[in-house]
Amino acid sequence: MNVKSFLQLPITKDFLIVAGIHGLSNPVNSVEILDFEFSPDIRTVRETIFNPHSVVLSSLLFARQKPEYLIDTIKSLIELGVSALAYKPVIFQNLPDEVIAFANDQNFPILQFGGDEFFEDIILEVVAYTKEQVKAHKLETIIKKLIEKKVNEEQIHSFLQQMNKPFEKYVFAANLQIDTTENTEWINSLFQLEPLLKSGIICTYKKSIFILMTNPSKYFQFEKILNEWMTMYAIPKESFIIGYSQVQCTQKTLHLAVREAFFARILAEINVQPICHYEKLATDTLLIELYRENTPFAMKFVHKYLNPLLDEKVDPDLIQTAITYILKKGNIKEVATSHFCHPNTIRYRMTKIRQLIAPADNDFVFYEQLSAAIKLHLLHNRIEKSAIVFE
């Protein structure tokens, strides 16, 4: 949590930033109350007054008769590593100009209460938010390990205990990602479904959302139920790219459910489809497992095969044409439509591509190897892109 996210809490949404706007990235670990600690009439051990990375709340009553105390207070808060000061405008509606100027110069945020918010309520809300953040981080760490690490049944049991939910025998997973950079509020709206997940979880993973449901029956209609819930909460499923796993055993193959949903969503992105079911990926699952088990080996093949097309000196239309050619399963007319050109232009480019990367291969071998290289190339790029995490 930082000062910026502190200001996005429901109880602080009406707070005003009166100084130090460039310090909103300061971390916030706690919230504390300032009464008379900086009054010269009170002796305290300064080092123990406030914790670093805290937001200090105050009515500034101690400076009622002595506004000059304020500048020394701000200096002391900065020395103690405090991240921001939030004051209630009961004594000072507006702070002295020299205080504002100093805080701006030091990039120290000073916030003004928006109304009659109570100190205790602010502290409780920050504590609740922090607990949720810790929980979210723990769940995301578990998901990361299930996707990226080799896990055994003992570790799966440990993960399930940490999730602290009454899981059933079979697990179903969906991985959802917003299909546009706009309307990202739908990501947050998915958490409205959390109360419905009596035996499942919902959590973030990098730029996406995981929804895991468990059920005693392997024939549970997970996709149908999820669609009904999204409709009930007016969450448009067409705003998301969704990958679905196969049904797996919760206690034994939880990791497979998570991996399958993740890679199904990645393949949906690659193929420009709104939904992808892992069980329908056929031979693409071989490429997924190759990439997952031995990424360096897979990428060595990609670079060796596609380097003539990826060279900066080569016309970039060639690699883009090769990608579309594979995604359109070799349909020249559809490739031409996608590139807004004549089919003969595409045939010319494909001939040039063959000359550059596989002049001796027949049609079948050329398509097979180009398809594998292009799909691994796209898979790698999508996974690397997803490594950039939302703030």
Image (cartoon, rainbow, N blue to C red):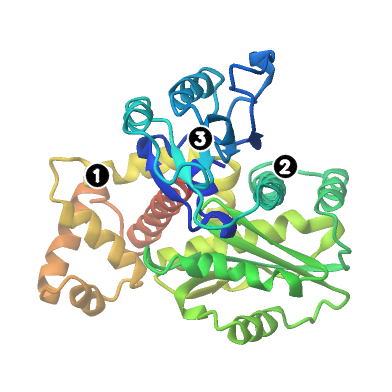
- Closer to the chain start, of discs 1 and 3, is 3
Q: Which mark is residue 84?
A: 3
Res 151 seen here: yes
- Residue 286: x and y, percent? 57, 57
Q: Quadrant of residue 331?
A: bottom left
Residue at 14% x, 75% y is 343
Answer with mark 1 or mark 2, whichever residue precedes in sequence.
2
User: Measuring 49% from the left and 55% from the top, which residue is drawn there?
Assistant: 114
Q: Is residue 81 left or right of residue 170?
A: left
**3D distance between C-alphas at marks 1 and 3:** 49 Å
Give the amino acid type for the residue marked by disc 3 in the picture: Ala
How many residues crowd around disc 1 within 10 Å: few (fewer than 14), some, or many (20 or more)? some
Left or right? Give the position of 251 relative to 56: right
Name the residue tied to disc 1: 310
Q: Nearer the viewer, residue 28 or 279?
A: 28
Residue 282, picture quadrant:
bottom right
Alpha-carbon neighbours of circle 2 within 10 Å: few (<14), some, or many (≥20)?
few
Residue underneath mark 2: 150
Instruction: Tell which of 168 and 42 is nearer to you.
Output: 42
Q: Identify whether 127 is placed above or below 240.
A: above
Q: Is residue 226 left or right of residue 218?
A: left
Disc 3 on helix, strand or loop?
strand
Q: Position of residue 165 (x, y in %)?
A: 85, 60
Considering only order in the chain, which callout, 2 or 3, is on the residue closer to the N terminus? 3
